[in-house]
Amino acid sequence: MLGRRVVVYGGGNTAIDMARTAKRLGATEAIIVYRRTRERMPAHDFEVEEALQEGVMVKWLSTIKQQGDAGALTIEKMVLDAKGNPQPTGEFETLEADSLVLALGQDVDLSLLEGVPGLQIKDGVVQVDPATMMTGHPGVFAGGDMVPAERNVTVAVGHGKKAARHIDAWLRGTTVIPTAKHGAATFERLNTWYYTDAPKTMRPQLDLARRTSSFDEVQGGLTEDNALFEARRCLSCGNCFECDNCYGVCPDNAVIKLGPGQRFEFNYEYCKGCGMCAAECPCGAIEMVAEQV
Ligand SMILES: Cc1cc2nc3c(=O)[nH]c(=O)nc-3n(C[C@H](O)[C@H](O)[C@H](O)COP(=O)(O)OP(=O)(O)OC[C@H]3O[C@@H](n4cnc5c(N)ncnc54)[C@H](O)[C@@H]3O)c2cc1C
């Protein structure tokens, strides 16, 4: 039971999540105590906004100095110095709390890996070869929050994908040969007028009244139709998406269609190097290369 007034100490996304969760679990008041200002809070601004809408309160420029008896917290007022770091002021006040939740950081539970030969743990995370995600113990791979990297879902999913390829290769006794990457298609190489403008799709938002009494998603996802529509915003920079422009504009019939998903080939016996295909490619996927004589 969290109690009527829950105080959360911290300032990141976790603190915001904690306070919003406390509200959903029945706390009358959820108060975040944070040392800096809103501008300096390491949380997404839309999440801060949603929390405030849900009635979460924030004591900005404040730190918890001491926890006394009967839930009395001593709060010290802070000021930001020239570098934006919080400094104590010596001004105190008392804040009564039924529960205090610390949202000051996250540690990984590495007990599972204790004693694994060759596996190295440094600064609370498992060391891996960043190219393969393999730890110092052959055949043991790691990724996500437990390796040195940014801690977010995108990074964790990327690690999973990379590790999966290397695990597969390791089990087969082979190595992953990365596919060659083409150079960056800079903005000048795009023909943006081929693309139409479309307003951004708005994601559905749960009514404020329903938010604090349920754990339903606040920002809904896109429907399949809308997601496909949004995906069409992609300018496909440098990646042929088979629009057939090159095929249509080539005066020499030098562009050969290889079929859906296979893109095109150029017949250099016919090509006179006019460059129409490259100039008219919407996504800068064709590069003109000087002929070797
Ligand atoms: C409150 C909070 C809010 C966050 N908000 C965001 C956000 O808005 N956006 C964002 O991108 N990231 C956010 N993150 C970070 C994000 O959740 C993590 O970076 C991401 O989940 C890491 O993925 P992971 O697979 O490494 O670990 P996890 O998602 O933690 O998955 C590890 C899994 O392993 C299981 N496990 C642990 N030990 C064992 C064991 N011995 N045996 C079997 N299973 C075990 C755990 O139960 C868990 O299911 C947030 C994190 C927190 C805590």
Image (cartoon, helix red, strand yellow):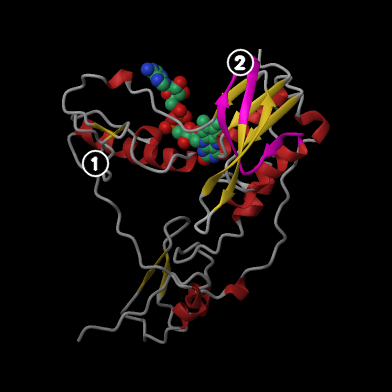
Taking the image as drawn, is residue 141 in sight?
Answer: yes
Picture disc at residue 129: 1
- Residue for point 49% across, 38% down: 153
Q: Is residue 180 magenta?
A: no
**Quick one: SS at disc 2?**
helix
Residue drawn at 25 percent across, 28 percent down: 140
The residues bearing labels 1 and 2 have C-alpha atoms spaced at a distance of 49 Å
State the extent of the magenta-drawn residues as a range.
54-74
Residue 208 at x, y percent in the picture: 80, 35
Give residue 132's position: percent from left, percent from top: 26, 41
Furthest residue in direction right, as rendered: 209
Looking at the picture, which amino acid does disc 1 mark? Answer: Asp
Residue where numbered disc 2 is placed: 69
Along the line of sight, the residue nearer the viewer: 256 or 141: 141
Q: In this view, does 23 lie above or below 81?
A: above
47 left or right of 141 in image: right
Instruction: Say which label, 1 or 2, has the lower sequence index.
Output: 2
Snapshot quadrant of residue 213: top right
Q: Which residue is drawn at 50% across and 74% down?
A: 187
Q: Is residue 70 magenta?
A: yes
Local crowd at mark 2 within 10 Å, few (<14), some, or many (≥20)? few
